Amino acid sequence: MAFAEAKTIDRNTIPVIDIAPLRDGTGAAEVAGQLHAASQELGFIYITGHGIPEDLIEIARARAYEFFRADPGEKEAVRVSDRHRGWIGPGGAKMQDNAKPDLKESFIWGWQDADSATPEDHPLRGRNQWPAFLPSFEANAMAYFHAAHEVAHHMMRGFALGLGLAPDFFLRTADRPLSRASFVYYPAQPEDLGPARFGVGPHTDFGVLTVLCQDDVGGLQVQDRDGDWVHAPPIPGSLIVNVADLLSRWTAGAFKSTPHRVVNTSGRERLSLVLAYDPNPETEIDPSEVYGREVEGAEAPIICGDYLIWRFGKAFAYRKG
C-alpha cells in the first residue's frame, strides 16, 4: 500500500502575490488585478506582505501544540458544542459521504466581542470554549483570529476592486461575522493506511474565503485544471488564500473553488492555522449584484448562514445526531 500520489507543482501553477501595496494603498489597483486573474484559475494564491507578525504565528502554533499534545481527558472538557466551538477529535469529520473519516483533529473558535461574549443568534455561532489548563490560550488564539481576519478583509477589498466594484462591496454586512478559526493537527500518517486515507479528504471549502498558515512540513495538495493532484508546499513568510464555495457562487462561478486535500507523508506532526472567513449570517449571496440582472449561469441567491448550516450538517459527525 502507498500514499495518495501528487505531482511536484510547477512554479506558475499557484501565483505568489505581495499584498502589501493593497494593504497600504500604494498599489491597490495593480494587486487587485493580480488577485482577479488568480481567482479565475485555481483560486489558490500564495500571499506575502500580509502583515501578520511571525512571533504572533509562532505563539499561536505553540499554544495549539500544547493543546493537541495534552491528555485526551483535558481536551474532552471542550469537546465541540452544538454551535461548532471546541475540539473535534480524530474521525469527527469527513468531507464526502462515501469517504473515510479524516485523520485530523481540530480546535475551533470564532468571533467574540470585547467582553469575550458571542451572541447565540445562529446555529453556527455561540460561546467559544477555552481550555482551562492553558490560561493564555484564549488571548493568543483571539490575537491570531483578528490578524487573519484583517487579512481576509484586505483580500475581499482586493477582489471587489478587481471586479470593478466598490472596495467594501463584499464587506457591507461583516460587523458580526460567522467566521471561524481553527487549529488543525495532522498526526504522522502511516503509509499502510493506503491511498484512500487522508489527513483531510478531498473537498472544497464551504464558505467565502480561507486564509491558511502552513508550517514547514508540507502535505497540502490541490487538484489542477486537468484533474491531477499537485503539491502546494509551504513558502516561508507566506500564507495561502483560497476561494471557497460561496465566493465562487457570488461571482457566478468566475472565481474558482478548487478541491484540495492533505496527505501527511512526512513522518512528523503537522499543524495548520486556518481562518474561514464568512460575513454576517444574514448576508445574501446574489451574483446579480455583482454582474447585473442579466448574468448567465448564476445560481439562485442564497443566505450565507442557511448555506453553511446545510454544508456543516453533511460534513461533521456530531451534527448528525
Image (cartoon, helix red, strand yellow):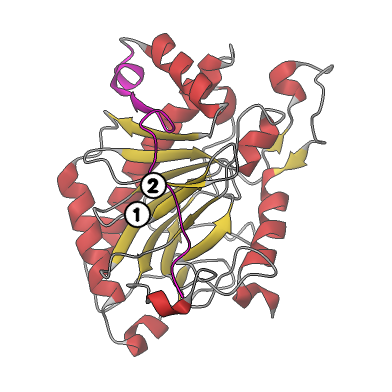
Task: Judge from the rendering whether residue 276 lies leftward or rightward of residue 249; answer left or right.
Answer: left
> Which span of residues is magenta-colored?
1-25
Can the viewer see residue 215 in this picture? yes
Residue at the farthest front position: 1
Main structural element of the magenta stretch: helix, strand or loop?
A: loop
The label shown at residue 60 is none
Residue occupying image coordinates x 31% and y 51% = 214
Q: Residues within 10 Å of mark 1 (few under 14, many from 20)?
A: many
Residue at the farthest bottom position: 73
Q: Nearer the viewer, residue 74 or 72?
A: 72
Which quadrant is the C terminus positioned in?
bottom right
The residue that disc 1 covers is: 273
Tags 2 and 1 in contact by the CB under 8 Å rule? Answer: yes
**Residue 196 vertical placement versus 50 (above, below):** below
Q: Give the mark, 2 or 1, whose residue is nearer the N terminus.
A: 2
Task: Judge from the rendering whether residue 6 lies leftward or rightward of residue 296; answer left or right.
Answer: left
Residue occupying image coordinates x 56% and y 57% = 202
Q: Nearer the viewer, residue 228 or 285?
A: 228
What is the secondary structure assignment of the residue under circle 1?
A: strand
Q: Magenta includes 5?
A: yes
The residue that disc 2 covers is: 212
Mark 2 vs mark 1, CA separation in Å: 6 Å
Q: Position of residue 149 (x, y in %)?
A: 40, 41
Residue occupying image coordinates x 29% and y 77% = 132
Q: Position of residue 189 (x, y in %)?
A: 37, 73
Q: Position of residue 93 (x, y in %)?
A: 56, 70
Q: Position of residue 51 (x, y in %)?
A: 25, 33
Task: Judge from the rendering whether residue 298 lies leftward or rightward of residue 307; answer left or right.
Answer: right
Q: Residues within 10 Å of mark 2 (few under 14, many from 20)?
A: many
Q: What is the three-letter code of the residue carrying label 1?
A: Leu
